[in-house]
Image (tube, rainbow, N blue to C red):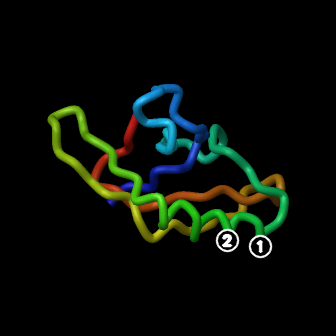
Amino acid sequence: MLKAYVYRWRLSVSPEESDKIDHWFTSEPAKAATWFAREDAQNDCATFDRHRIEVVSEDGKKHVCSGFQIEEVESGEFVVFCLTPFVPQ
């Protein structure tokens, strides 16, 4: 399994899916979104788990992202990731 770091997220721009949240991931922790406080990152892990984020690999396989975790980076900030069989792009 590979670490897929949360890069960013936003409400969907599609009018038909106005309640959907789009998510982006990166394989590089240096490019991931950062949190200043561990508690905030932990709270968002729980939120991401509730979103039931589904990603599709290049060959069409679907994976539901779950079990989000935090990792402290050199700057003392925190990043959020989940383990996936591939890194969603």
Q: Which structural element holds mark 2?
A: helix
Amino acid, disc 2:
Gln
Asked if residue 56 lies left or right of residue 60, the reply is right
Q: Is residue 46 above or below residue 4?
A: below
Asked if residue 22 lies left or right of residue 85, the reply is right
The residue that appears at 46% across and 26% down in the rendered structure is 14
Image location of residue 80, percent across then percent down? 60, 58
Image location of residue 39, percent across then percent down? 77, 73
The quarter in which the C terminus is drawn is: top left
Q: How many marks?
A: 2
Viewer-closest of 3 and 68: 68
Amino acid, disc 1:
Glu
Disc 2/disc 1 C-alpha distance (Å)? 5 Å
The residue that appears at 64% across and 64% down in the rendered structure is 71
User: Label 2, on which residue?
Assistant: 42
Image location of residue 63, percent across then percent down? 27, 54
Q: Quadrant of residue 44?
A: bottom right
Asked if residue 40 lies left or right of residue 10, the reply is right
Tell me whether the residue at label 2 lies in contact with that at label 1, contact meaning CB atoms closer than 8 angstroms: yes
The quarter in which the N terminus is drawn is: bottom left
Image location of residue 58, percent across then percent down? 22, 32
The residue that appears at 48% across and 66% down in the rendered structure is 49
Q: Is residue 53 above or below residue 69?
A: above
Residue 81, disc: none
**Residue 43 at least partly seen:** yes
Viewer-closest of 55 and 22: 22
Q: Is residue 54 above or below residue 60?
A: below
User: Label 1, on which residue?
Assistant: 39
Q: Residues within 10 Å of mark 2 (few under 14, many from 20)?
A: some
The residue that appears at 46% across and 50% down in the rendered structure is 4
